[in-house]
Amino acid sequence: MKTLLRHFLSILTGLITCAVSGGISAPAEELSLFALNVGKADCLLLRSGETAYLIDTARGRSFDDIESTLADLGVSHLDGVLITHMDSDHVGGLKKLLKSDIQVDHLYIPAFYLPEKEKDENPAVKAASKQNVSIERLHGGDQLPLDGGELRVLGPLHEARDKEDNNSLVLFARAAGGSMLLAGDMEFPEESDLLSAGVIPQADVLKIGNHGDNDATSEALLNAVQPKVAVISTSTEEKSSTPSSRVLRLLSKWNVEVFQTQEAKTGILVTIRDGNIDVEIK
């Protein structure tokens, strides 16, 4: 009940803020997700109207490719960078990004962090402190501004002490007549938390959790989300168990069209316009 109340209050606060600042913005014509091919890692560019967020920064070795791709897409300014969790294949490029010429207005990280070693410093906090960048910590129920739409944080709801993957930010974006659910690296325990709390909505596009590995993406999750399109960010060459045959069979059973970043040179672009989904392999 507390979780549901928190989500309701967050949505109400967002509506009040919009009203005070001059009204709710006009609906966006497009909602797009560009999932970059960065190997078995995540780097996603989410755009709606004038808003652009980078979700995860892959490994440090991929940053030159990320920077080049953003330049090709005409992105020199990011309203925010969201690090879903602190594994190196998600946060590794943050230091280089913050030192680059790309303007970053805000840096967001999960409220919870499980270090590999007790004294390990949060790598996002470390990178941000060296560049004098402020950090906002997020958890389920929070909302972020999205031009012409909404961007909601579904999880984490609780601190995970088993694996850092289960502290992942799980995000829901809605605009242009469609929606996307971005699962970070959440595994079955975090899925179960969110499903039990009743906060997983239907979404047209699902960014599959944990690179399509076998420890994530349950049938219960697919039943709740009912996606039409799934995107998997991975490299089978780097980790042979991704994507899992079980996950691929499950997606096929639910008639979900699947795209993998490793199939692309640069990445997978998913665009929603008037509720219609267009997918390009770049």
Image: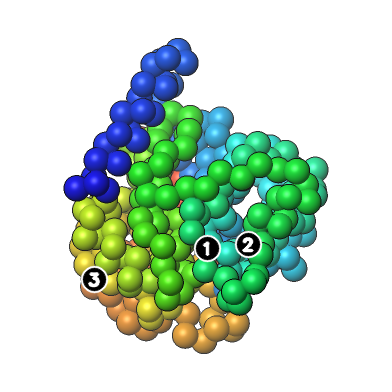
Residue 219, numbered circle: 3
| SS state under label 3 | helix
Position above or below: 183 against 15: below
Q: Position of residue 86 (x, y in %)?
A: 58, 64
Three-letter amino acid code at disc 3?
A: Glu
Q: What residue do we see at 37% from left, 40% from top?
A: 174
Residue for badge 2: 122
Q: Decide if residue 188 is on the left or right side of residue 264.
A: left
CA gap, disc 2 and disc 3: 33 Å
Residue for badge 1: 113
Residue 159 in view:
yes
Residue 149 versus residue 154: which sits nearer the camera? 154
Chain-order first, disc 2 or disc 3? 2
CA gap, disc 1 and disc 3: 27 Å
Chain-order first, disc 1 or disc 3? 1
Tell me whether the residue at label 2 lies in contact with that at label 3, contact meaning CB atoms closer than 8 angstroms. no
Residue 118 image-quadrant placement: bottom right
